[in-house]
Image (spheres, rainbow, N blue to C red):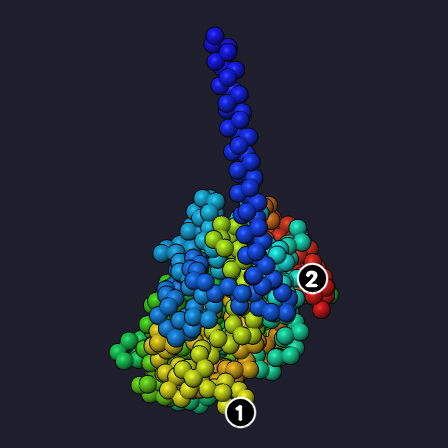
Amino acid sequence: MRRKFLSKGFSVLLILSLVLALFSGCSSKTNENASDEKDTDKPKASADAPGWQSNKDPITFDWYVNFSWFAHKWGDDVVSKYVTDKTGVSVNFISPAGNEAEKMNTMIASGKLPDFITIGWWEDAVKKMIVGELVLPLNELADQYDPYFFKVSDGAKVEWYKQEDGNTYGYPNASSSPKDFDKYKDLKPSNQTFLVRKDMYEAIGSPDMSTPEGFLKALEEAKKKFPEVNGAPLIPFGLNEFTDVGNTSLEGYLQNFLAIPMEKDGKVYDRSQDPEYLAWLKTFREANDKGLLAKDIFIDKRPQMEEKIAQGRYFAMLYQRSDLAAQQHALYAKDPNSVYIAVDGPANSKGDAPALAGDSISGWTVTLISKDVKDKERAIQFLTYLISEEGQMDLYMGKEGETYDMVNGKPEFKPEVLDLLNKDRAAFDQQYGASFKYWMLMDTNMSLAWAPPASEPFKQMEDWTKGKTVSYAEFDGISPTGTSAEGVAASKIAQEWGKTLPKLLLAKSDKEFDKLFSEFQKKRDSFGFEKVEKYQQDLYEKNKKKLEAAE
């Protein structure tokens, strides 16, 4: 009886299953037809037309920016409202509240990332995201959803960021290929400057500070003539902050001013051993011996430095000009003669012109699209729009008739907009949001066609660097990172250098300096410097091939 009941029950279930399958098949067919009709109505992705134009439905992407200082919001200014009206895309920016590396590692460990990620190209997290398959290949997304990407992207940059699997996952900002560099080198400024306070410099006779003797004498005279600034001691010479791995002013900046080569006879050159470089580090040691290096420069962090720049307390600085824009405004408003100007700084014994770094092919940051992105198609279409000339002009110039007008075929900011840009960048950002407030994918070459001429108090600093910039593209990213043997060795060496550098400047004599430097070299060798050198050489040679392939 039980077996008979089960048999009947099974038969009923079988019949029901067949009916449901038939119904499901019809339903599926209907859905397929509906889908086909929908796809037929929708314009096909084309290499000749921007994909974003085919769908402007409202969508909001979460965009993580790996810089704790980035605090801008989307939708509060002319540019972001205009872009959203035009494309349908809104952005929810996310930035870390504290340590950037910790935040990135936490997100990577979770296996889930926001839709877009913008991060320094040199960060270990970039490789972790790619190896962990947490981000999508831009080339595959473009093939499937928006071939227009290949029309507007720079082939050299796509090739540069191509991984061993043949895919490109990130697209850079502020990037220049060697061809770009050749094309724009006379227009392209560097950010690396040797600055002096104009009134003080002129008061001591505008001396030549390019030689060790002239440099030391100028600091002495400035301190003697201006012992205090508004009741606070003068700081004769300023630098970037000292970190646990060194000081950028006393490394790449100084080496570039001294025109020390990056390679010799096809081999990566160890610039830190160069006699010209060591001679200038000894000059700074002598400056400290003469009481010309204030204690402040060894302990101050960025906020303290910015406050002292705004007070005009530094006489001279080896610093990046863009990072004192707000302070320059404040000084200029009080007294135009109290601003900082760029002059010839430390030079090698031959008096060669400096070889300052401009935009590299790696750029500053890379932007990636997460595997968890809520809409792959809209994401690659939005990225393609942003890197296109149309998107770049929208982000830089804003909305025609509101932030700029066309004058003789060229976009020009309206007078009141340009006036605010030159006088109060923070207010300009809040109201208009143009001039690359949203810099994540900015093309600093393309924008040269629209950028208004620099005005004082910035023009002099910018103009001084033009014609002195060079491309160091083939040396981008050649230092090992991460947990590989080379990466661990490089990290230990960097940490040791961070401890040694201030000691070199504080040494009581050149003899003590030499002893400290010799000890550093021995430790460096014991940490595995030979591995680091081999890694750098191998990557340098690969980089050269990449650049050749992109030409």
Q: Does residue 402 appear left or right of residue 37 in this picture?
A: left
User: Which residue is under mark 2?
Assistant: 546
> What x and y, as percent, mark residue 96?
39, 56
> What x and y, as percent, mark residue 511?
52, 63
Looking at the image, can residue 86 be seen?
yes
Please tell me in which quadrant of the rendered image residue 360 appears. bottom right
* Residue 306 or residue 194, whichever sits in front: 306
Please tell me in which quadrant of the rendered image residue 220 appears. bottom left
Which SS class for mark 1? loop
Q: Does residue 323 appear left or right of residue 274 in this picture?
A: left
Q: Which amino acid type is marked by label 2?
A: Lys
> What x and y, as percent, mark residue 358?
57, 73
> What x and y, as percent, mark residue 326?
37, 76
User: Which residue is under mark 1?
Assistant: 408
* Residue 116 or residue 299, whichever sits in front: 116
* Residue 192 or residue 368, whichever sits in front: 368
Q: Are marks 1 and 2 in contact (CB under 8 Å)?
A: no
- Residue drawn at x 55%, y 47% is 30
Question: Mark 1 or 2, which is nearer the eye?
Answer: 1
Determine crowd level at label 2: few under 14, some 14-19, many 20+ residues with C-alpha closer than 10 A: some
Q: Which amino acid type is marked by label 1?
A: Asn
